[in-house]
Amino acid sequence: MTFTTGMLSRKVVANTYAKTAMNAALEAVTKILAKELAPIRVNAVSPGLTRTTAYKKMDQAARETMYANAKNQLPVGKVGEAHDVAKAYLFAIETPYMTGAIIDVDGGALLN
């Protein structure tokens, strides 16, 4: 099993308490299920800002400004793409010696 969480579980951002609680709960459940369902492997992927259709309702200029600001602040110097996150899921699925892991694919956002 591979869940999707988000970096808000471990990054303090004002006015995100509902998302923070949901993501933190999923990460805790990932670890609990990894132990309780063993030998079934349970992991989670925690993506950061990624260029997807999730932001299609934003004004295009605001969206591009958001991406540009993130690019300038992230240690990797780029915004994530869907294929970047997909590789993390493949890694979780294809690695038989990993369970209970939270895989951060956030361009280093949690370091800031």
Image (spheres, rainbow, N blue to C red):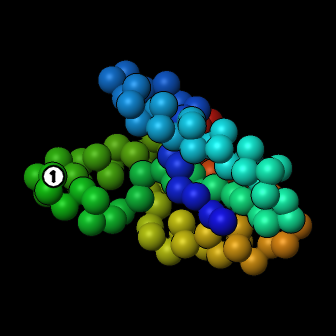
> Is residue 36 in sight in this rendering?
yes
Q: Secondary structure at mark 1?
A: loop
Provide the residue designation for mark 1: 58
Given the current orientation, which residue lies at the most extreme top position?
14
Closer-to-camera residue (66/53): 53
Given the current orientation, which residue lies at the most extreme front position?
36
Q: Amino acid at mark 1?
A: Met
Residue 91 drawn above or below residue 25 = below
Query: Where does residue 29 sit, x and y in percent of width and height?
Result: 65, 44
> Is residue 103 in sight in this rendering?
no
Q: Residue at x 36, y 63 (%)?
A: 51
Query: Where does residue 112 sit, x and y in percent of width and height?
Result: 56, 33
Closer-to-camera residue (103/111): 103
Q: Which quadrant holds the N terminus?
A: bottom right
Closer-to-camera residue (25/80): 25
Residue 70 drawn above or below residue 17 = below
Q: Residue at x 24, y 48 (%)?
A: 65
Closer-to-camera residue (48/107): 48
Q: Residue at x 65, y 75 (%)?
A: 90
Given the current orientation, which residue lies at the most extreme left position?
59
- Tell me the crowding category of disc 1: few under 14, some 14 to 19, or many 20 or more residues within 10 angstroms, Cα based: few
Query: Where does residue 105 sit, x and y in percent of width and height?
Result: 58, 56
Q: Residue at x 78, y 58 (%)?
A: 37
Query: Where does residue 99 sit, x and y in percent of width and height?
Result: 80, 58
Residue 26: name its quadrant. Answer: top right
Q: Is residue 41 left or right of residue 44?
A: right
